[in-house]
Structure formats: C-alpha cells, structure tokens
Image (tube, rainbow, N blue to C red):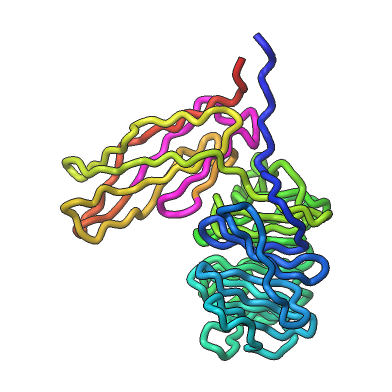
Amino acid sequence: MSAPQPAPSPWVNVPGSLAQVTAANGDHAAGVNSAGGIYKYQPRNNSWTQIDNPGTVKQVALADNGDMYGVDQAGNIWAYRADGQGWGQIHDGAYQHVALAKDGTLFAATLVQVYNLGTGTPVAVGSAINGTITQFDVGQPDTVLIVNGGIVFKYNPTSFAWDTLPMDPGLSIVDVAVGYEGVMYAIDTANKIYRYVGQGGDPGRKNWLTIPGGLAQISCFDGADVWGVNRHDAIYKLRVDTTIPLTVNFGTNNKLSIAPDEVTVPFGKTYKLQWTVNATGHNNVSITAITFDNDPPFANLCGNFGPSVFVVDNDLNPGNNDNGFNYTLYLTADGQSFNTDPKIINQPSTGGD
C-alpha cells in the first residue's frame, strides 16, 4: 500500500496577469493590470477581454450584470455600463477604494471614512477612522469590513461604530474580502491566505484559519467564487471540483427528507453542496438555516456560504474531523417551520491507496 497522497492545491491558475481582481456571481471577474489595463473575464473560453480605461482607473468593482465601477489615481469614481454606454465619471473626491454590496449598492472609502453612494449622495458609514483605511470590502449593505493598522474592523449598524474582529497573535492583515452571506477571507503581510471562523474566546482555536497558497490580494462573491492575485500578478481562482445537488422534500409532522440522504466527500476534493427545495404544493418557502455539529469545529474543513450553499474543502486542514459531521436544515413554508433529522457528510482525511 502506497503512502497517502497530499491534497492538491485549492487554487487554480487562470491565464492572464492582473494587479487587482474583483469577483462577481457566476464565475465572473474583472481587474486591472500593472499597466492600467482593465479586463473582464470570459468564463466560456477562460480568457480576458480588455475594456478601455477612461483615464487612470486603478481599482474596479464588478456588478453581476457586467457593469463596473472604478476609482482613479485622483480619487474620482467612474461607472462603466455594459450596455454600450461605456465609462462616465459619477463622483469627485479623495476616494481610495470602491466596492459593491451584493445587492449592487456602491460603496467607497477615503483614507479615513467609508461612504454609501447608493443614493448618489455620499452617506457616511460609521465614524471616521483614527488611522488609515488600507483596504475595505462590502458583503450585504450592512456588512462592511475595513483594514486599519493590520486589524480587521466590522461596521456595527446598531452603534454606528467599528467593532474589532478577533485577531490571532502576530497576525497583521493587509487585504480583506467578504462574501454575500458573510464569509470572510484575508491576506497578511507575508501573503498568507486566511478564512475567518471566529472562535474567539477559546484559546485552543484560531479565529483565522490558514488556506494553502500565497496571494497579495483577494476578492470573493461567495465561498465558491473566490479570486486572487499573487505578488507576481498571477491570477488564481479557488478550485471547486464539482457541485453535488441535494433535493429537499416535505414529509409529515413538519419533517424534511433529503436525497441523497448521506454524502461522502473524497479526500483532496473541494465540493460545493447545494440544496434545492421541492416546493410543489407549498407557498413562501425559504431555507432559514443549515447548522452543523461543532466538535471539532466544522469550519476547520468547510464553510457555510449562503442559505443553500455549503463548500467542503477536503482536505485543506488535514487531520481534523476524520469521520465527517452532521448537519440539520431548517426552512419555513406555509407559515410553519420544518427541519430535517441530522444528516451526515462523510470526510475521510487521508488519500487513497
């Protein structure tokens, strides 16, 4: 019997060269290269199409419909319309970064303040920063992250303040990305990649888990659409080997069944599990939660990236959770609550023969 094979890299190299990349839904991306060229990714042929730069745009954010927003060297914000209207300047100012919330709302940051530009008039998000905003990103409109002094802060819409996310000793962050359901990635000063799991308060567990590879900048739409560039401007995308569809059916006594009932994720594979509800005969159906057993913490191997999507990285962090873990799915329909009995995802943590 041969020794177990190591897990392959979770990253796939994408042809091209960019200094900054931005991720959108459905395997779409855009970015700016070191010479100021702006490009949009064409997933059908794994290539890039150049878009004219209206001036000195240095960083862009991509919308799901193909529109883009960019900030130039002078701090002005530009909008690109994919319907053929091209670029037009929409804001003056001293902006350093732009980001799009997952509903399409435009945000921008100066060195000390984040603004919501969704109404056309800048509205301050939180208080001004005592320090410098070196990077920021937005998930949902109320999920705003900034990097200040190597620490990640999250906007608190209740207190209008910036809350410090739990950090691990010695960790200094330079870039951060947040997906539409709150998954967070970050890059440190050594170009190491991390995913936030938030085990703060437990000295035996890290708040930020390392993902193999090295990047200088990262962007994500969700847990499956994650892009990055390294310090040599090479472009990478998180590898998802395949998608496993799971069908949720209504049973009796407010119970749900799932087909297939049990899933095994082979070693060294990254799988996207996606649940779809057979809603025939029911109204107002919505998946409300998918919960997981937590000992050891499921986040060591996987992440919950939406109300119906779950990515299993097996085995990005070897040696954990050899036998898999249970999950329970909850939904509402017809004004009532439904749930499954615990279902298992098997995760062998060693390679084959």
Residue 75 lies, with reference to residue 323, above or below; the image says below
Q: Is residue 315 magenta?
A: yes
Rendered image quadrant of residue 213: top right
In front of the other: 219 or 200: 219
146 or 10: nearer the viewer: 10
| Residue displayed at 64% across by 83% down | 87
Q: Is residue 232 magenta?
A: no
Q: Nearer the viewer, residue 42 or 129?
A: 42
Please identify the quadrant where the N terminus is shown. Answer: top right
Range covered by the magenta-colored residues? 305-329
Residue 64, horizontal then vertical, whole percent: 51, 67
Instruction: Give the residue at x 78% y 75%.
Output: 131
Q: Quadrant of the C terminus?
A: top right
Residue 56: image quadrant is: bottom right
Q: Is residue 112 visible?
A: no
Q: Residue at x 19, y 41 (%)?
A: 251
